[in-house]
């Protein structure tokens, strides 16, 4: 009996077998391929890559398959693999002005140089379940010539080699918006060095970039509802492909090593000014791999909130509190600690039981006397 | 038992990472009770399930080590089994359940009942390394409090317990003062185990993976449980003896044996319990 209470080797083995069976599901149904996941669940793949901090769509698809679509489990799998990989170096900063733009919207000007480009977005879809998809048939596209498969998507991307200026850069010229400062210290890898509060903005952004989408969304939302209000406008959101270059020491210059589909969001926020600074617009920044607009926007709002100290704003809400936001934004850490409550706590509980009994006895004796 | 894992370094972590952790441990040993930040890695086991202890074990383990892993004092709890497998697979080391035979003991929530000896290393899994955390949640503040030896708040907390309950109401993770300098969280061991830390001949290492902190108590170091002259520290005691081995001196787990809520009390340290039974059988 006693041994049964303490789990064991066989229980773990059986649990793994059951899990494998459940993951596969009905063997009559064809098994998902990684290609299918990558192609048809691309936004899930993007999220796993972002929060897993490893930009390999095939591995992300494998993680999603192995985790039965549980995003945090998939992110965990990818992270645990990432930690074993060697670091070859640091790429040059990417230049989002050179992006081959797939989507670009600004909510602050009706038109901007380069234009507004809707791209593939759910924004204006009516959220009606499409039963033609359920019938295993593809939904008829309205215009048969508009093929939005990922293959065509590469050519849809604006081939214009000319730079598309960022909207906020245009405002910078009139000094109406702050000019961003580059980091004072070389960027560090927070998966190699522990966070040390207070942290610089670049490190903060790194933490937010890997942070949980739901958590950042909720925090961002809280600032809009008045908990650390930042009066935001979506200055610009753009998605597209940028080139990534690595510096090669032997050559003395950098060479492109590949391309990355990314989403960038710049928020414009009001600032009343201070004794030394006239009223001006400030900014919040969000960057994610893939088409991860919800996360990029949330990140930008939270980034701005966390700059409260810099603008001498009163820090009174959770989204403005650096230690609070950053200590809890990592979902692998968060779920690990919450889930560890499933582990045995017999000993601590026994200690508490003993204590409570003692306290109650003491009270009874006291009441009796 | 699963086969040894190929394609990974001995004990999973790469040598550079182990070296980084060992440097942190050396500092921790040099300043007993000081929390040393380290570049904790993401392990293939979840945060909160012993990643700190696992990284410490991986950094100090050698092929001739004999490893014991316990959780709640028991060798056969699921997570202890899982962690022991991890090292059996990634390091191929010998494992044991016998406390005296182990050169390394990784533990969660208990210190073995059998006295440890010189040369043994006890590695604790730590969830929250900061003893002041539940009084002051901010790292930036608690760091200052440690630097200034500003531990008054801890005594106030213990005093408030006495004022409210007539006694200190902390039953586990009971704060200790190490080497007369740092207040330290002994990890969530029952206060029953606290006296075992004091002047222990074994090296005690602590790893907190999620919080990325290491700390240590070198052999033969003072570890004093905080108390007051008129309310001295005391440990738990039971009216019952162990129902299996009859031990009167060990920490007992309470087990509910039927729907009527009847209980039995048994040793939480499974090895100690078996040893006692074997001795009385023989």
Image (cartoon, helix red, strand yellow):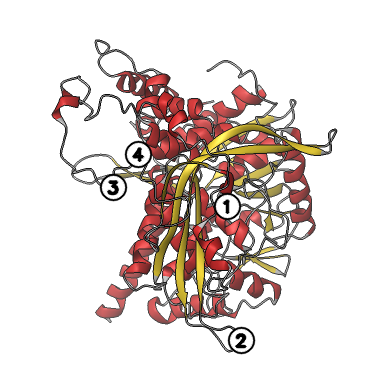
Real-space Cα distance between discs 2 and 1?
Answer: 30 Å
Query: What residue would you read off at disc 3?
Result: A123
Identify the mark at residue A276; answer none if there is no mark: 2
Which mark is in front, 1 or 4?
4
Q: How many marks?
A: 4
Is the residue marked by circle 2 packed among few (<14), some (14-19), or many (20+) residues within 10 Å?
few
- Residue depicted at x 39% and y 59%: A352
Dot placed on the residue nearer the N-terminal end, 2 or 1? 1
Real-space Cα distance between discs 2 and 3?
Answer: 41 Å
Dot placed on the residue nearer the N-terminal end, 1 or 3? 3
Dot placed on the residue nearer the N-terminal end, 2 or 3? 3
Q: Chain of mark 1?
A: A
* Labels 4 and 3 in the same subunit: yes
Q: Given contact means CB atoms under 8 Å apart, are the residues at marks 4 and 3 in contact?
A: no
Query: What residue would you read off at disc 1?
Result: A206
Real-space Cα distance between discs 4 and 3?
Answer: 9 Å
Residue A330 visible in the picture: yes
* Labels 4 and 2 in the same subunit: yes
Dot placed on the residue nearer the N-terminal end, 4 or 2? 4
Is the residue marked by circle 3 packed among few (<14), some (14-19), or many (20+) residues within 10 Å?
few
């Amino acid at each position: 009996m006693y041994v049964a209470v303490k789990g064991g080797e066989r229980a773990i083995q059986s649990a793994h077998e059951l899990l494998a069976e459940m993951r596969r599901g009905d063997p009559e149904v064809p098994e998902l391929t990684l290609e299918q996941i990558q192609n048809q669940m691309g936004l899930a793949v993007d999220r796993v890559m972002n929060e897993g901090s490893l930009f390999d769509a095939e591995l992300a698809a494998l993680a999603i398959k192995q985790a039965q679509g549980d995003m945090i489990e998939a992110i965990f799998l990818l992270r645990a693999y990432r930690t074993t990989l060697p670091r070859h170096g640091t790429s040059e900063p990417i230049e989002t002005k050179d992006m081959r733009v797939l989507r670009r919207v600004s909510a602050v000007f009706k038109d901007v140089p380069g234009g507004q480009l809707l791209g593939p977005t759910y924004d204006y879809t009516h959220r009606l379940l499409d039963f033609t998809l359920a019938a295993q048939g593809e939904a008829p596209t309205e215009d048969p010539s508009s093929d939005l498969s990922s293959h065509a998507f590469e050519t849809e991307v604006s081939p214009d080699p000319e730079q598309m200026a960022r909207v906020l850069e245009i405002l910078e010229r009139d000094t109406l918006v702050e000019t961003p400062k580059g980091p004072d210290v070389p960027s560090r890898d927070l998966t190699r060095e522990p966070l040390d509060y207070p942290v610089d903005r670049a490190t903060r952004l790194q933490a937010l970039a890997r942070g949980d989408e739901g958590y950042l969304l909720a925090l961002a939302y809280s600032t809009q509802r008045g908990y650390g209000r930042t009066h935001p406008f979506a200055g610009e959101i753009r998605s597209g492909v940028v080139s990534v270059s690595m510096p090669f020491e032997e050559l003395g210059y950098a060479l492109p090593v590949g391309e990355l589909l990314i989403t960038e969001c710049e928020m414009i926020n009001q600032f009343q000014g201070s004794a030394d600074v006239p009223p001006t617009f400030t900014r919040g920044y969000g960057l994610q791999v893939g088409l991860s607009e919800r996360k990029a926007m949330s990140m930008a709002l939270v980034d701005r909130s966390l700059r409260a100290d810099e603008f001498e704003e009163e820090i009174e809400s959770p989204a403005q509190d650096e230690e609070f936001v950053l200590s809890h934004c990592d979902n692998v850490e968060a779920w690990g600690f919450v889930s560890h409550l499933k582990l045995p706590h017999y000993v601590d509980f026994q200690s508490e039981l003993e204590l409570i009994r003692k306290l109650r006895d003491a009270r009874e004796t006291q009441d009796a006397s | 038992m699963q086969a040894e894992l190929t394609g990974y370094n001995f004990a999973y972590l790469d040598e550079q990472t182990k070296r980084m952790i060992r440097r942190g441990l050396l500092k921790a040993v040099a300043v007993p009770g000081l929390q040393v930040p380290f570049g904790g890695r993401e392990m293939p086991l979840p945060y909160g399930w012993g990643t700190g202890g696992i990284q410490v074990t991986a950094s100090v383990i050698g092929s001739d080590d004999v490893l014991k892993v316990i959780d709640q004092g028991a060798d056969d709890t699921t997570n202890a089994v899982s962690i022991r497998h991890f090292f059996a697979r990634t390091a191929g080391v010998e494992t044991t359940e016998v406390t005296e035979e182990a050169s390394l003991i990784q533990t969660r929530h208990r210190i073995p009942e059998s006295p440890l000896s010189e040369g043994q290393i006890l590695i604790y899994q730590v969830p929250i390394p900061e003893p002041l955390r539940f009084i002051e949640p901010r790292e930036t503040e608690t760091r200052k409090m440690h630097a200034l030896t500003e531990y008054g708040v801890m005594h106030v907390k213990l005093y408030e317990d006495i004022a409210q309950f007539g006694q200190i109401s902390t039953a586990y993770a009971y704060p200790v003062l190490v080497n007369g300098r740092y207040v330290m969280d002994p990890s969530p061991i029952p206060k029953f185990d606290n006296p075992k830390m004091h002047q222990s001949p074994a090296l005690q290492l602590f790893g907190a993976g999620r919080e990325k902190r290491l700390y240590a108590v070198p052999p033969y170091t003072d570890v004093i449980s905080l108390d007051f002259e008129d309310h001295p520290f005391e440990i738990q005691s039971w009216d019952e003896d162990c129902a299996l081995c009859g031990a009167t001196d060990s920490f007992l787990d309470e087990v509910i044996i039927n729907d009527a809520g009847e209980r039995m009390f048994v040793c939480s340290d499974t090895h100690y319990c078996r040893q006692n039974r074997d001795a009385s059988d023989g």
